[in-house]
Amino acid sequence: MDHALITLLVASTGLLSLVAAGHALLHKRDSRSALVWMILNLTLPLIGPFLYWCLGINRISRRARSWQESGRRLSGADIYPLEDHQGIEPRLPDAATHLHDLRVLADRVVTTRLREGNRITPLIDGEEAYPAMLVAIRRARESINISSYIFDADGIGAAFVSHLIEAAERGVEVRVMIDALGEKYSRVSPHRAFHGTRVRLEHYLSLRHGAYINLRNHRKLLVIDGREAFSGGMNISDRHLTASTPTATAVRDMHFCIQGPVVADLQRAFLEDWHFVTGERLDNPLFFPAIEQCGNALVRCISDGPDKD
């Protein structure tokens, strides 16, 4: 092979590695992720940049931000009446004044505000969380919005399916969002379980074209009538019923029952995801009822997702 051609190929390969490493350095907000991709790009010519192009670049970030901004404008941010829209900030209690700097930092880097007057009830494992969630679903009168990475439609999941279908049949608007990849872990598909019912089921980032395998939505969230929410670390799965699940497969975790003004932010997080997936703009005021303060917990909802690195 001609010496000049070899030189050109080597130079092009090196330049490609440098460009890919530079892109990772400039665009990856997680320093550890940036370092890993830089090392791969510089030590594995061609292979490193190829992997970075396929898996390392978050191509939905810009689209997600645009759609979710639209979702914020159209999902109750302007119609939810809270005192913080008038610039009134909740005061930190004396026992938490050491958190002032953290609070200022959070105010500057996230769009949601610190909400006061909330009640947070911890729920340990599925034995405590699932019965409370099912009771809340039975009480629902207007809307149920539920998001889960994994939703096993058998076992305890079958109870959720039947409760959600029954709620939809009595006139409650029921929306279920499941991550398209997370559904593959389900023994019984919720898609089949809800087929032909009034429950609206959507998948987050379809896998039909094999895209976005590394960009998933792990949110676990249930919002009832815009007034009560459940969120934490548990999917809908028998694996969180630790008393009846073999030790090798049991997963211990916590969920929380959340009441108070911060529920509006959790509702908004779901509606933004729904808008991102479906393009549907849910601006009905019933999603954001006036919520009275009911406790003494200061809470901030910080939404993360596949539009983040």
Image (tube, rainbow, N blue to C red):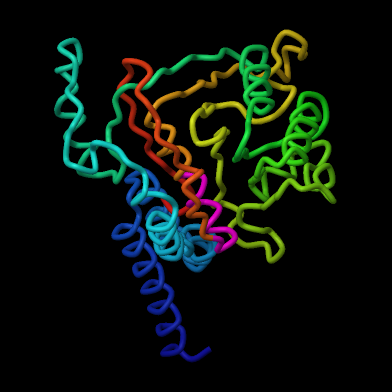
Q: Residue at x 19, y 22 (%)?
A: 99
Res 31 visible: yes
Res 146 visible: no
Q: Is residue 233 above or below residue 14?
A: above
Q: Residue at x 34, y 67 (%)?
A: 18
* Number of residue marks: 0
Magenta stretch in the rendered image: 269-280
Q: Residue 106 vs residue 143: left or right?
A: left
Expressed as whole percent of the image width and height from the top left, the position of residue 15 reads 36, 74
Q: Is residue 34 above or below residue 87?
A: below
Q: Nearer the viewer, residue 99 or 83?
A: 83
For residue 120, what is the image quadrant? Answer: top left
Q: Residue 241 vs residue 35: left or right?
A: right
Q: Is residue 199 above or below residue 43?
A: above
User: Chief secondary structure of the magenta span?
Assistant: helix
Q: Residue 58 vs residue 278: left or right?
A: left
Q: Nearer the viewer, residue 150 or 137?
A: 137
Expressed as whole percent of the image width and height from the top left, the position of residue 72 reads 39, 54
User: Per the image, is 272 magenta?
Assistant: yes
Expressed as whole percent of the image width and height from the top left, the position of residue 268 reads 45, 45
Expressed as whole percent of the image width and height from the top left, the position of residue 143 reads 60, 40
Q: Nearer the viewer, residue 172 or 38?
A: 172
User: Per the image, is 65 magenta?
Assistant: no
Q: Residue at x 51, y 21 (%)?
A: 257
Q: Residue 299 vs residue 253: left or right?
A: left
Q: Nearer the viewer, residue 258 or 207?
A: 258
Q: Residue at x 45, y 81 (%)?
A: 9
